[in-house]
Image (tube, grey):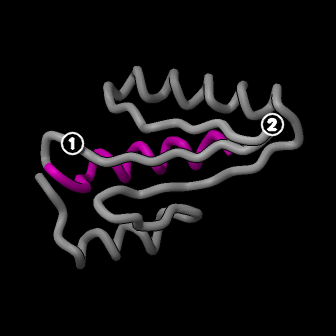
Amino acid sequence: MKLSDEQINDHLSRAGGWRLEGNEIARGLKFDDFISAIEFVNQVASVAEEMDHHPDIFIHGWNNVRLSVTTHEEGGLTERDFRLAERVNALI
């Protein structure tokens, strides 16, 4: 079920590093090197597969990763998006 603006703001206050961008939440990360960035992306991929909830992943430069997530079938953010964000934060 799609979250209200109040619920989104509450979740964001606890989702360290994530920010609201339209109908999705996003987080940018910078790593020491390319290999570290790719290893992180692979960890995110494993979590996403386990949850059957997949973020958009953008690798740019040689050590920057941007993740964004939304629940397309709900047309916005759901609890599921914030659970994925929490799991991603646990990898850092």
- The C terminus sits in image quarter: top right
Residue highlighted by disc 1: 72
Mark 1 nearby-residue class (10 Å; few <14, some 14–19, many ≥20): few
Residue drawn at 80 percent across, 44 percent down: 31
Residue drawn at 34 percent across, 74 percent down: 10
- Proximity of marks 2 and 1: CB atoms separated by less than 8 Å: no
Asked where in the image residue 13 lies, by quadrant, the reply is bottom left
Residue 24 x %, y %: 35, 56
Q: Nearer the viewer, residue 76 or 16?
A: 76
Asked where in the image residue 52 lies, by quadrant, the reply is top left
Asked where in the image residue 88 lies, by quadrant, the reply is top right
Q: Secondary structure at mark 2?
A: loop
- Give, as a single range, the part of the protein colored magenta: 75-92
Q: Nearer the viewer, residue 76 or 87?
A: 76
Residue 65 x %, y %: 65, 42
Query: Is the magenta region chiefly helix, strand or loop?
Result: helix
Residue 89, magenta (yes or no): yes
Instruction: Residue at the far front: name it.
Output: 61
Locate residue 39 relative to residue 49 in the image: left or right: right
Residue 2 x %, y %: 14, 57
Q: Which mark is residue 62?
A: 2
Locate residue 64 relative to residue 32 in the image: left or right: left
Q: CA distance from mark 2 to mark 1?
A: 29 Å
